[in-house]
Image (tube, rainbow, N blue to C red):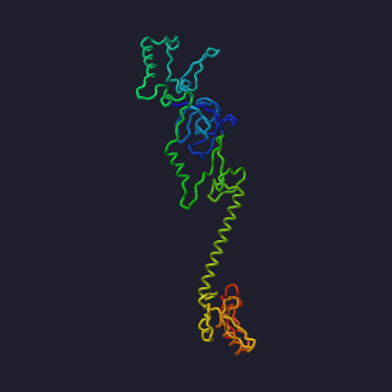
């Protein structure tokens, strides 16, 4: 005999939602299963019940959620309510209980209408022996009522979640290869209605939302979409800056542009030829002798007063021979195409 269920949830909504298939994302039937209806269990999987309507209003067949966030939407009916009963009406007609599976399987005998007799002597003796067994202590434990063997009355036998369903949930929450997490695109509220979630903050999106980057059936708040666009623009700007810096460094190496420490002439050799022993290598300065009105090279510890002797000799040589100051510049090779033309080094006088 199939298990019978009674709808106890969705009283304020006119019943509970019924879907065409086991998946929560499957289409929902427009008509709800009314509260108080009685259904027969066809199959059970992952907390979802496939039913057939026995009495009440609603879809004749479909899939419903039995328990949602600790709130029972359907409850199992006691075994006594699943038997066939015959009630006499005022018109003399007989009314059959709709919870019976088939009227062809039920046979009424005249003996069933007679008053039942009390238990026989043997039945009473067997019942007394059964009651006396409660006081025995066979396993060495404390005698008395064993709650593990006899659970509390009034509680329906709730079916546990299958092991495969638990493993599927744990696998869905594991990090993917790119380091992200697969978040559910929708959730079912306490009333059994499907509510879409934002793929960025995992909060309900409400009435207005943008389509997410995951494609169809993915939604994003307007505020979350603004953050996504800002992050995308920042990533594009970072890639552009990195590409330009790499290109600039490559051009500097190719055309020998830019300052390098190993290209700066050293002062030690020239200072020694001029009779100046530098205490700190490379730091030399010019000192004016007011008495003889001459200039000489002297060591110094002040970087701001130091000069490069090779550059100084080159400038004095150009001043003496060309009667002008030396000039260095980077000029475009093709002045008519300044955006794409490379630059060349120009020394004057050459």
| 144 versus 48 height, above or below | above
Left or right of 32 in this view: 157: left
> Which x, y percent locates residue 65?
51, 34
Q: Locate residue 307: give its quadrant.
A: bottom right
Judging depth in this view, the residue of 117 and 301 nearest the camera is: 301
Judging depth in this view, the residue of 60 and 347 nearest the camera is: 347
Judging depth in this view, the residue of 139 and 245 nearest the camera is: 139
> Which x, y percent locates residue 175?
47, 48
Left or right of 127 in this view: 336: right
| 91 versus 247 height, above or below | above
Give the quarter of the figure containing the C terminus.
Answer: bottom right
> Which x, y percent locates residue 312?
58, 83
Q: How many marks?
A: 0
Left or right of 345 in this view: 3: left
| 281 versus 66 height, above or below | below
> Which x, y percent locates residue 256?
52, 76
The structure residue drawn at horizontal position 50% and vertical position 25%, both measured from the top left corner, is: 54
Residue with the most extreme front position: 291
The structure residue drawn at horizontal position 57% and vertical position 55%, both measured from the top left corner, is: 231
């Amino acid at each position: 005999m199939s298990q019978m269920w009674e709808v106890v949830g969705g009283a304020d909504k006119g019943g509970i939602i019924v879907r065409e298939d086991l998946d929560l994302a499957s289409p929902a039937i427009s008509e709800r299963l009314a509260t108080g209806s009685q259904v027969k269990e066809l199959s059970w999987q992952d907390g979802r019940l496939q039913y057939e309507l026995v009495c009440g209003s609603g879809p004749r067949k479909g899939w419903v959620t039995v328990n949602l966030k600790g709130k029972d939407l359907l409850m199992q009916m006691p075994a006594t309510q699943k038997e066939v009963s015959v009630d006499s009406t005022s018109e003399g007609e007989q009314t059959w209980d709709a919870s019976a599976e088939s009227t062809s399987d039920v046979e009424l005998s005249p003996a069933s209408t007679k008053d039942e007799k009390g238990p026989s002597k043997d039945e009473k003796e067997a019942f007394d022996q059964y009651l006396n067994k409660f006081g025995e202590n066979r396993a060495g434990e404390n005698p008395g009522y064993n709650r593990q063997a006899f659970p509390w009355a009034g509680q329906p036998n709730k079916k546990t979640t299958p092991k495969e369903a638990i493993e599927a949930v744990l696998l869905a929450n594991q990090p993917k290869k790119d380091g992200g997490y697969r978040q559910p695109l929708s959730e079912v509220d306490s009333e059994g209605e499907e509510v879409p979630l934002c793929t960025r903050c995992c909060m309900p999106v409400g009435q207005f939302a943008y389509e997410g980057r995951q494609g169809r059936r993915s939604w994003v708040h307007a505020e979350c979409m603004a953050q996504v666009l800002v992050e995308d623009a920042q990533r594009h700007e970072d890639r552009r800056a990195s590409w330009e810096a790499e290109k600039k460094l490559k051009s500097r190496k190719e055309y020998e542009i830019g300052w390098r420490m190993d290209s700066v002439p050293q002062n030690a050799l020239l200072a020694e030829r001029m009779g100046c022993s530098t205490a700190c290598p490379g730091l030399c300065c010019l000192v004016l002798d007011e008495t003889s009105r001459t200039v000489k090279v002297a060591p110094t510890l002040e970087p701001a007063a130091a000069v490069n002797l090779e550059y100084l000799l080159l400038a004095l040589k150009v001043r003496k021979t060309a009667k002008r100051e030396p000039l260095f510049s980077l000029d475009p090779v093709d002045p008519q195409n300044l955006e794409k033309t490379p630059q060349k080094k120009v020394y004057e006088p050459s």
